[in-house]
Image: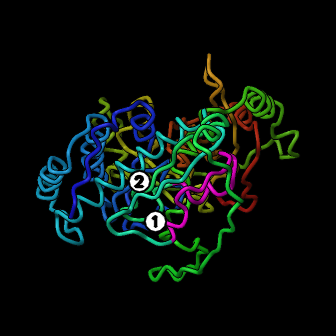
Amino acid sequence: MAKVEYGSLKFAEAIDFFKTKVDVPTARWADIWRDQHNLAFMVAGAAKADLLADMRKIVDQSIANGKSLNWFQKEFKGLVKKHGWDHTGSAAWRANIIYSTNMRQSYNAGRYAQLQHFEYWRYKHGDSRNPRLHHKSKDGTILPKTSPFWNVWFPQNGWGCRCKVFGESDKSLARKGLKPSKEPTIENREWIDKATGESHQVPVGIDPGFDYAPGKASQASIHQSREQTTKLTQLATKQNWQTHGRPEKLPQPIYQGELAPIVSTKEALQSTIEKYIGSKESVIKGPVPALNVYVDAKYLAEHIDIKRAPFVPILLRTISDPYEVWETWHEIPSTDKLVNRLRYIYPVKAGKYKGQLLVAEVQKGILIAYTFVPVKSLNYLNKQRVGNLIYVNEGSSNE
């Protein structure tokens, strides 16, 4: 098999694209689908966070420093031995898949960012040794960058695909004697995920899960307009429990579970969180799948006061059985970027405390437990009931 080398890859757009991804442990390659790859780093079967974190380090070094496939394969074998990972396929084959896919997609995402300066984009077929006829048929296709074709057919368009896109202007097209192409018709075929039985419509000629533009999601977030920022932040401050017609008085059931011991160090706080979530990190199920929260014990421990350790057990119920969940948007000073946060309200009597507030931040499409606060005053909880009300549990027992 020919080696893949990326000596000219080292440019900021490709590096930045990969660095903004969030590690997502997965069991199968299809657990992360289509443009979710713009936001998530995964290695199929790498379900342990420490293994995935180590894999990310060597991929990051490969992208940022132009490391070779031979270097990556040696590092990969070392990590497999260190973690005792029973992966599918041979080590050389698996390392090549991880290396080439992440290198190419980061490169393509970087190209997507660079190509925004050109009015037209031109498809260039690259699989010369083993040409895929559908990819080859797109060679020379020239379309405006706004064409829906690029939402589907921007490379990489399958495992090992080496096709590329080049930018053109009116002047360059005239100089080369080229003209824009007729808008292509994109035909779909049904593909069934054998593991789940789920049916997907996949464009003919593209491998399942590759019909998206690498980098497009990140570009959209980078270029959020000031108008959107203003609108969302104003909306968050104007709406509250009163405008939504919610009752002012919150229920006050008595918490029947145990509280955790008092601790004196951040390390002990982290251990407490690990004990109750069952591992160093875990996805705690919310009342609906969209409200599931990813809890990283180390990250959460760094963002809360150690005095809150006794109330860690209540955190699980706050996520799984909240009274209300509110969405707010916060503008990062001196930028046009927004931070999306969800506030989980859980009123419950636990000694002198009357409830708990969990704040989960949306990071790359995933809800991350950012902080939680044991609350002594119901009035304080009421002040947190602002923004867009996205979940109500009228029948919650909260016991």
Does the magenta run of residues contain 189? no
Magenta highlight range = 134-154
Badge 1 marks a residue whose secondary structure is helix
Question: Residue 24 shows which numbered tag?
Answer: 2
Question: Residue 31 shows which numbered tag?
Answer: 1
From this viewpoint, is residue 136 visible?
yes
Image quadrant assignment for residue 385:
top right
Disc 1 to disc 2, C-alpha distance:
10 Å
Does the magenta run of residues contain 150? yes
Disc nearer the start of the sequence (1/2) = 2
Amino acid type, residue under disc 2 in the picture = Val
Would residue 112 be found to the left or right of residue 101 on screen? right
Question: Residue 312 shows which numbered tag?
Answer: none
* In the foreground, 234 or 249: 234
Estimate the x, y position of residue 49 in percent, counting from the top left: 31, 52
- At 88% from the left and 40% from the top, the residue drawn is 243
Q: Count residues near mark 1 (Cα–Cα under 10 Å), then give few for <14, some for 14-19, many for 20+.
A: some
- At 34% from the left and 69% from the top, the residue drawn is 130
Badge 2 marks a residue whose secondary structure is loop
Would residue 31 be found to the left or right of residue 172 on screen? left
- Residue farthest toward the top in the current orientation of the protein: 334
From this viewpoint, is residue 360 visible?
no
Q: Which quadrant is home to the C terminus?
A: bottom right
- At 34% from the left and 44% from the top, the residue drawn is 272
